Image: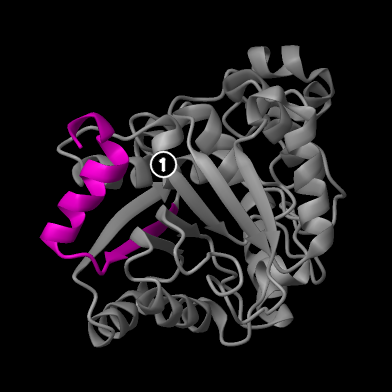
Amino acid sequence: MPKQEQKARLHPRNKNREQYDLKALIAVKPALGEFVKPNKYGDDSVEFSNPKAVKLLNQALLHHYYGLEHWDFPDTFLTPPIPGRADYLHHVADLLGESNFGRIPEGDLITCFDIGVGANCIYPIIGVAEYGWNFIGSDINQESLDIAEKHIAANPILKDKITLKLQENSKDAFFNIIGRDEKIDVSICNPPFHASSEDAIAGTRRKVKNLTGEEQETPEQNFGGIHQELVCLGGELSFIKNIIRESERYATNCFWFTTLVSKQSNVRAIQKILKKHEAYDIKVIKMGTGNKSVRMIAWTFLAKEEQQVWRTLRWNKKEA
């Protein structure tokens, strides 16, 4: 697939829609230069199969495009691909805009709940930088939250914009995090999509082969990730089932519930579950980065009249 065609699949507002400006990125993160070499086409490219290179690239992207000067954590934690994470939030912003007569609500008008914020805290970071939204981030790992808190403390643009909470029950999403009378405008989730550690290793093995052409029995994950970030008993479908079950209990607390879905084969089952729980509206939004296709599924339990009240009271307060 031609490089331009690969990038063209990114959201129009994605800052990484074009080819990476490697000179600019190396200028803000000189160490990245050690991992930039000509690819098989003779073009300078980052060694994406190398975990250190991927992390340095992401640090440079966050600094250059999003104004984040400090972002670091132990290599055992997940290093997320920035363009794909940004794409999710841009599509969420479009979803909110479509529900608000074409105007994307920005700033303190929006509170977004990130289920499984992780040590990288990447969705809140990009969401604050791009739209000024407020975030609640939950995680079942206290160490992840401690590291995420360091990102917030070290970068002034994140001050007073992100609240982090420990989820003590790994099977819960909203329970014990969102109060019964608390309002959030949208929830997001990038669920662990492997059903076992063996599946995660097999996935990494395929990824490394695609990047290098080499077969490795025990490959090093180029994006890292602790067990909880990558693996869930029953895979992503089981994880999303739990979110849907809880979301019905929080039907009037949140306008849009969303989640990423990695496997196309799970989409129909998720739609069926949502209809069983009587979601008022269900949307499947296709996304893609490079040669990888994913999709966002969004649902709401609010009827049209309830949506109008929500818009008036939260997004268009001057009209109230």
**Which residue is pictured at 50% across the width and 84% down the height?**
238
Image quarter (top left, top right, bottom left or bottom right) of the N terminus: top left
Dividing the picture into quarters, in which one does residue 200 lie? bottom right
Point out residue 255 in the picture as x, y percentages from the top left corner: 31, 57
Position of 211 relative to 266 (above/below):
above
The three-letter amino acid code for the residue at tag 1 is: Ile
Find disc 1 in the rendering and name its residue.
Answer: 110
Closer-to-camera residue (152/307): 307
Would you say residue 219 is visible in this rendering?
A: yes
Few, some or many C-alpha atoms within 10 Å of disc 1 (few <14, some 14-19, many ≥20)?
Answer: many
Point out residue 228 in the picture as x, y percentages from the top left corner: 72, 71
Point out residue 48 in the picture as x, y percentages from the top left corner: 69, 42
**Which residue is pictured at 24% across the width and 75% down the height?**
279
Number of numbered discs on residues: 1
**Which residue is pictured at 39% across the width and 39% down the height?**
90
Residue 297 colored in magenta in the image? yes
- The magenta stretch is 292-320
Q: Is residue 287 left or right of residue 142?
A: left
Point out residue 12 in the picture as x, y percentages from the top left corner: 33, 30
